[in-house]
Image: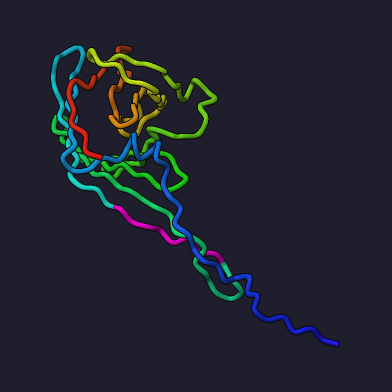
């Protein structure tokens, strides 16, 4: 006696779209028209950073199925391109579904600026309930501590990011054992 099974194909799926985390999007992806003005706390020098473009795409997640491949799901990806006028540098922020916010400058590896995973090691990150920066209070600030930041030539850097505002402060450890600090003094956000 033989059984013939029909109508069941383990490879057949209906792919769904997996969304990028709203927490990460709120910290790291802003539309053209957004800009930030930072001031060096020691010298008073200012740096303007503007969003030049945002790219949205979906990535196909594929898995082996018999002798071929099948689409399993689609995941959201966002890329935000910015320009820093003081540093004369272009940056790209990258958000993908299920991944942290990554920021890179051209031809360098990316640094992690924000993750919505639990912050369990204060040597790498902290959550600051309220942080005052240039006479403004920001809530739920995420401090990312990068011991060898590719954005700043391998230096120790503390990045402070706030929801719906982006990067509000950065502290860069210099070779003379002092800190170079840039504080957000003005911004305009389009999300």
Q: Residue furthest right?
A: 1
Quadrant housing the C terminus? top left
Q: Residue at x 13, y 33 (%)?
A: 85
Quadrant housing the N terminus? bottom right
Q: Is residue 139 left or right of residue 120?
A: left
Q: Which residues are magenta?
A: 56-63
Q: Is residue 64 left or right of residue 153?
A: right
Q: Which secondary structure dominates the residues rendered in magenta? A: strand
Q: Nearer the viewer, residue 188 or 167?
A: 188
Q: How many discs appear? A: 0
Residue 181 x/y as whole percent: 26, 17
Rendering colour mode: rainbow
Q: Residue at x 21, y 34 (%)?
A: 189
Q: Residue at x 55, y 64 (%)?
A: 63
Q: Nearer the viewer, residue 24 or 85?
A: 24
Residue 171 x/y as whole percent: 31, 19
Q: Is residue 156 left or right of residue 106?
A: right
Is 131 contained in the magenta span?
Answer: no
The answer to whether residue 67 is above or below residue 177 is: below
Residue 36 x/y as whole percent: 19, 29
Q: Residue furthest front?
A: 7
Q: Residue at x 15, y 26 (%)?
A: 47
Q: Residue 131's quadrant in the figure? A: top left
Residue 21 x/y as whole percent: 42, 42
The answer to whether residue 148 is above or below residue 185 is: below
């Amino acid at each position: 006696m033989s059984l013939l099974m029909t109508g069941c194909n383990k490879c057949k799926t209906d792919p769904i779209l997996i969304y990028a985390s709203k927490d990460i999007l709120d910290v790291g992806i802003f539309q053209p028209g957004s800009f930030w003005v930072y001031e060096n706390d020691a010298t008073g020098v200012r740096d303007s950073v503007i969003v030049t473009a945002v790219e949205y795409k979906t990535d196909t997640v594929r898995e082996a199925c018999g002798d071929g491949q099948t689409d399993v799901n689609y995941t959201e990806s966002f890329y935000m391109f910015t320009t820093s006028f003081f540093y004369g540098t272009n940056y790209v922020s990258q958000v993908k579904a299920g991944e942290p916010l990554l920021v890179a400058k051209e031809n360098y590896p990316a640094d992690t600026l924000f993750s919505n995973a639990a912050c369990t090691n204060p040597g790498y990150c902290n959550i600051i309930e309220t942080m005052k920066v240039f006479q403004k209070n920001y809530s739920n600030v995420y401090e990312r501590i990068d011991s060898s930041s590719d954005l700043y030539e391998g230096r120790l850097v503390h990045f402070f990011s706030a929801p719906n505002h982006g990067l509000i402060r950065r502290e860069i450890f210099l070779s003379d054992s002092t800190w170079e600090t840039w504080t957000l003094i003005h911004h305009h956000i389009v999300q």
